[in-house]
Image: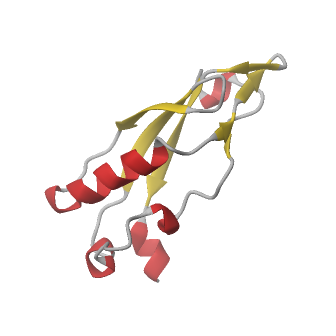
């Protein structure tokens, strides 16, 4: 279900931030990246079952986008709810790394 169709959106159990990235990330290059936009499909148990790109990813950011997708698949959410029942849902997230260095 879309975020508008649920009463309570799925929430990550941990923060989704730069700490998810591999330690060997080139932070200077991140400052020149476009935001990476992803859609997370979350099941009724709070597990990310699929990650889909919904925005353009520059060729230079391909490895970073892949690392984000892999990391997000391991994040657990409290499931979304509709009519007091846990339901499948999706959420769109954007990672704008420039903001982290301003």
Position of residue 6 measured from the top left corner of the image (x, y, whole percent): 71, 25
- Image x and y of residue 85, in percent: 79, 17
Q: Looking at the picture, does residue 14 appear above or below residue 78?
A: below
Reply above or below: 90 against 86.
below
**Residue located 44% across and 81% down the image:** 101
93, 41: nearer the viewer: 41
Residue 80 in the image: x percent, y percent? 70, 29
For residue 24, which quarter of the picture? bottom left
Q: Position of residue 73 (x, y in %)?
A: 46, 41
* Looking at the image, residue 83 lies above or below residue 49: above
The residue sitting at 82% across, 16% down in the picture is 83
Q: Residue furthest left?
A: 59
The one nearer the camera, 71 or 17, is 71
Q: Tell me which corner region of the image, top left, top right, bottom left or bottom right, holds residue 1.
A: top right
Q: How is the image coloured?
A: secondary structure
Q: Residue at x 46, y 52 (%)?
A: 94
């Amino acid at each position: 279900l879309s975020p508008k169709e649920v009463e309570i959106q799925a929430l990550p159990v941990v923060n989704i931030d730069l700490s998810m990235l591999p330690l060997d990330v080139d932070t200077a290059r991140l400052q020149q990246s476009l935001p990476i936009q992803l859609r997370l499909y979350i099941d009724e148990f709070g597990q990310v079952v699929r990650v889909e790109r919904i925005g353009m990813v520059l060729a230079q950011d391909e490895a970073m986008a892949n690392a984000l997708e892999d990391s997000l698949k391991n994040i657990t959410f409290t499931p979304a709810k509709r009519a007091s029942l846990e339901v499948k849902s999706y959420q769109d997230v954007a990672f704008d790394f420039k903001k982290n260095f301003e």
